Each structure stands twice: as structure tokens, then as C-alpha cells.
Amino acid sequence: MNNGINVNSEIGKLKTVLLHRPGAEVENITPDTMNQLLFDDIPFLKIAQKEHDFFAQTLRDNGAETLYIEQLATEVLDKDRAVRDEFLTRILTEAGYRHGRTFDELQEYLGSMSTKDMVDKIYAGVRKNELDIKRTILSDMAGSDAENLFYLNPLPNAYFTRDPQASMGVGMTINRMTFPARQPESLITEFIMKHHPRFKDTPIWRDRNHTTRIEGGDELILSKNVVAIGVSERTSSKTIQQLAKELFKNPLSTFDTVLAVEIPHNHAMMHLDTVFTMINHDQFTVFPGIFHGDGSINTFILTPGKNEEEVEIEHLTDLEKALKKVLKLTELDLIECGGGDAIIAPREQWNDGSNTLAISPGEIVTYDRNYVTIGLLKEHGIKVHEILSSELARGRGGARCMSQPLWREDL
Ligand SMILES: NC(=O)NCCC[C@H](N)C(=O)O
């Protein structure tokens, strides 16, 4: 069996991880499009790449194989012309083009490139001034508004490889992303999972052909049988119920419990992993801003129902209690971002102080800038590898967001 996925926890030793090195797409963010592209500022690409290379090197130095999604995409598209043509058609169709002059010219433009250049260009976006398309029919154009400077919009969030898909046990979810700015990213995943020999036999728990949404930053693998999923700006409760049913009934899945955690719906906390990450068997980072004034938070424990179409749901309002229950723990160490300080905690959370990537139990990678949280983590016995963060952080994601584990050693 050729299954490149084995992720039965958030903390097992990281052996293989999927990354994307930020590229020309970052230089296609403008002040006018920043919001719609889900950025709060414009990163300096050269430095962002250096920081990203440092991150990748840190992972390799600690025993992880790093795979680049753009490389895997190039491999699958290069091998089979029909797959490459189908991919290009899907990209253009999903961007809103129907057959006609613009479609044909874009197909011709991208189709004439080497596969690597085509993949890079799809990430980078196609600027209108790159090719001279005479528009004879107005409806030929996607988003025919003259203000859009692109025929194909850039994908600057692609370096957050956590989100378009999520490894879960021996399988994966390929995600229907919330915002158009990120939707093509999971189409790339779909082609890799379908055509790369490395993933030939990987079960897909849920594909992207849905109207309800989910993103990988909300999907946390707490153990071989428990996943936590954020009910967030990006993941709906409906998706969580549907996915739980799939996981409970599929014989290849080992999951029998889903813990849904309702978090505030806003950009700074867009995913569960921006406010909560697992760093050891019984230790977690948490941003206190997710709790209501009385310390409560809505959590729901989903377990198999009487038949495949039903799930049992238990509502708890105490995160600690819910975690202890699903993980069968008696003690828990919830380490607050910024020590819970009213000024430091939101400052550090904004730059992903709660977003850590565990590379083995009690050993994490995280942005260097959140020094108050880092100090606390060390006091709690965590080994911390600090990575550079001036430019990468401008996209509002940290070490966990920038990595999709494909293989972790079992605990
Ligand atoms: N898992 C994560 O929290 N990823 C960060 C994604 C940031 C990106 N700018 C976004 O808004 O989707």
C-alpha cells in the first residue's frame, strides 16, 4: 500500500512535512487587494524567503523530510499531458472563465510554459499587462471589472500549507476553503493526491466538492482516536458533523471522537490553531481571549450515534474538562499566550504566539518575536526552537500554519 500519510497526533516526532516557499505571488499583493487576499500588510519577499528557508532548515536539522507542494504539483503535471491539460482547464474554469477568447488565450499562455513555470505562474497570478487580450465579448472575462489588475489572482497564502488540506490518521481532508482568495490552493492538493504515486492509496475523508467549508488550521489531531475541530470563521458546524460521520463510519479511520471548539469569528483568530495548539501529551498553548467573561467556552463532544446517520453530541462549557474527558487525562497544563496579560497576550497572539508546531512531545518550533510566551513555555519545560518572523508573520500565521505534517512517528 502506497500511503504517504501517517498522522495520529499533533506531537509525534515529525518525519515528513509539506511546505510552500513563498514566491512571486507575495509581490502581487497591493494595498487595494490586501484585505481580499487576507493579508494585513505587504511582506518583503526576499526576507520572507530567507525566513522560510530558515524554518525549513530547522525542521530538516531536527530530522524531518521537507517536501514542497509546488514540486509535487510539478511532478504530477509533468508526467501526464492529459492531467496537466485537465488541471489548467479546472484552474481557469474555477476562476470563472468560460470557453472563449480569454480562456483560450490564457490556456495558450500558460500551456506553452514549462510545467514548473506554469505552476509558479499559477501561484504568482497572471497580471493583465502580461498579455494582450482583445476583449470582444464582455462576458468572456471573469470578474469583468476593469479594476482587477489580474486575469488570474495570486495565491499569496499558499505558504500556509496547513489549511487547504489536513492529514488525519492515514487519510486526508481536501478542503473547501472559505474565501475565493484561497480556493485554488486545494485544487492543487486534489491533483497531487489523485495523481502522485506517493499518495496513491490515501483515503480522502472528505473532498473539496462541498458547499460547506473547513480549513486545516481548525483540524487538530489530539490522539489516534480524537480530533479537535474549531467552529470558526473558516469552518462550519455543519461540516464538522458531516466529517464526524465519515470518520466514524470509515473502517480505515481510527477516530471515534470529535471535539468541536467554538472560537471567536474574526481575522486574528481565523482558525483554532491561532489560539490553541497541543505541545505535549498533557500540555497546550491557549489564548485566553477565546473564553467568555466567566471563563466558559462552547465545546461539543461528538461520538458515534445509534446508526451511521447519527452522532451523539454532548455540550460542555469548560475546555479543560472537555480535554480531560476526551483524552482521559487527570491533569492538564494550559499555558496562556503572553501569560494572559491584557496587553501582551493579544499582541503576541496577533503575531502567532499561540501557534506552535510540535516536532516531538514537548519540543516545538515557534516565532522568535513572542518572547514572553516563549519564556513561559520554557518555564513549563518545553524545548523551543525559535524561527525568524519579521515578514512571514504579516500573513497572520505561524509555524503550525506554515506546515502540513504528512508523517509523524506514532506515540
Ligand atoms: N492555520 C492558520 O491559521 N493559517 C493562517 C492563515 C493566514 C491567511 N492569511 C488566511 O487568512 O487564511
Image (cartoon, helix red, strand yellow):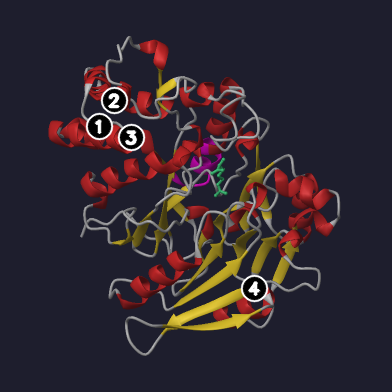
Report, in whole angstroms, how far the alpha carbon at label 2 lies from the one at label 4: 47 Å
Q: State the residue in front, 94 or 248.
A: 94
Report, in whole angstroms, how far the alpha carbon at label 4 lies from the one at label 3: 38 Å
Q: Earlier in the sequence, mark 2 or mark 1?
A: 1
Q: Which residues are magenta?
A: 56-65
Numbered circle sitting on residue 96: 3
Mark 2 and ligand 1: say if the CB distance to the nearest ligand atom is below 8 Å.
no
Location of residue 105 in the rendering, given as x and y in whole percent from the top left corner = 24, 18
Look at the picture and state if 317 lies above or below 183.
Answer: below
Query: Do tag 3 and tag 1 residues touch (Cβ < 8 Å)?
Result: yes
The mark total stands at 4
Q: State the residue in front, 176 or 79.
A: 176
Q: Residues within 10 Å of mark 2 (few under 14, many from 20)?
A: some
Look at the picture and state if 302 lies above or below 6.
Answer: below
Please tell me whether the stretch drawn in magenta is mainly helix, strand or loop: helix
Find numbered disc 1 in the image and state the secondary structure of the residue it sits on.
loop
Q: Earlier in the sequence, mark 4 or mark 3?
A: 3
Report, in whole angstroms, how far the alpha carbon at label 3 lies from the one at label 2: 9 Å
Q: Amino acid at mark 2?
A: Asp
The residue labelled by disc 1 is 98
Query: Do tag 4 and tag 3 residues touch (Cβ < 8 Å)?
Result: no
Q: Amino acid at mark 1?
A: Arg
The residue labelled by disc 4 is 298
Location of residue 24 in the rendering, given as x and y in whole percent from the top left corner = 47, 22
Q: Residue at x 59, y 56 (%)?
A: 273
Residue 6 magenta: no
Q: Residue at x 38, y 83 (%)?
A: 310
Q: Nearer the viewer, mark 4 or mark 3?
A: 3
Q: Amino acid at mark 3?
A: Gly
